[in-house]
Image (cartoon, rainbow, N blue to C red):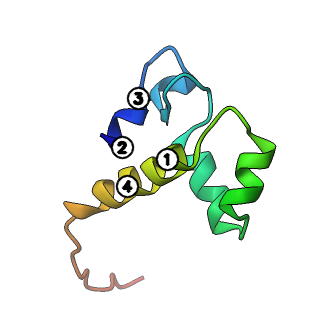
Amino acid sequence: MMIDRITANPKILGGKPVIRGTRLSVEFILELLASGMSEEAILEDYPHITREDIRACLKYAARSCKNEIYLELDPVAA
């Protein structure tokens, strides 16, 4: 299962979700992708991870947003 590639351990990066067996956080990989870096470039710079690891990061992020509740707040008078 793709999501099994992501783990969190309080002793690694303060418990941030990381790619299993690495110190690369899901957040870091998402930031690379958001900055326009291609999967190929990420894999070239970090050859110890796989394309499936990158996709697991995306899947983890999608699942993290899935159960969020959005509320419209009234503006507060200053």
Which amino acid, mark 1? Glu
Q: Mark 3 or mark 1, which is nearer to you?
A: 1
| Residue linked to disc 4 | 59
Residue 33 screen position, x and y as percent? 64, 63
- Asked if disc 3 and disc 2 are in contact, CB closer than 8 Å, the reply is no
Marks 4/2: CA–CA distance: 8 Å
Earlier-in-chain disc, 4 versus 2: 2
Q: Which quarter of the figure has residue 41? A: bottom right
- Asked if disc 3 and disc 1 are in contact, CB closer than 8 Å, the reply is no
Earlier-in-chain disc, 1 versus 2: 2
In depth, the one of 35 and 14 nearer the eye is: 35
Disc 2, SS: helix
Q: Mark 1 or mark 4, which is nearer to you?
A: 1
Which amino acid, mark 2? Met
Please tell me which residue is depicted at 80% across the width and 44% down the height of the picture: 45
Residue 53 screen position, x and y as percent? 51, 43
Earlier-in-chain disc, 3 versus 2: 2
Marks 1/4: CA–CA distance: 10 Å
- Asked if disc 1 and disc 2 are in contact, CB closer than 8 Å, the reply is yes
Disc 3, SS: strand
| Residue linked to disc 3 | 7
Earlier-in-chain disc, 1 versus 4: 1
Earlier-in-chain disc, 3 versus 1: 3
Marks 3/1: CA–CA distance: 14 Å
Figure label count: 4
Please tell me which residue is depicted at 45% across the width and 57% down the height of the picture: 58
Question: Residue 2 shows which numbered tag?
Answer: 2
Please tell me which residue is depicted at 19% across the width and 60% down the height of the picture: 67
| Residue linked to disc 1 | 52
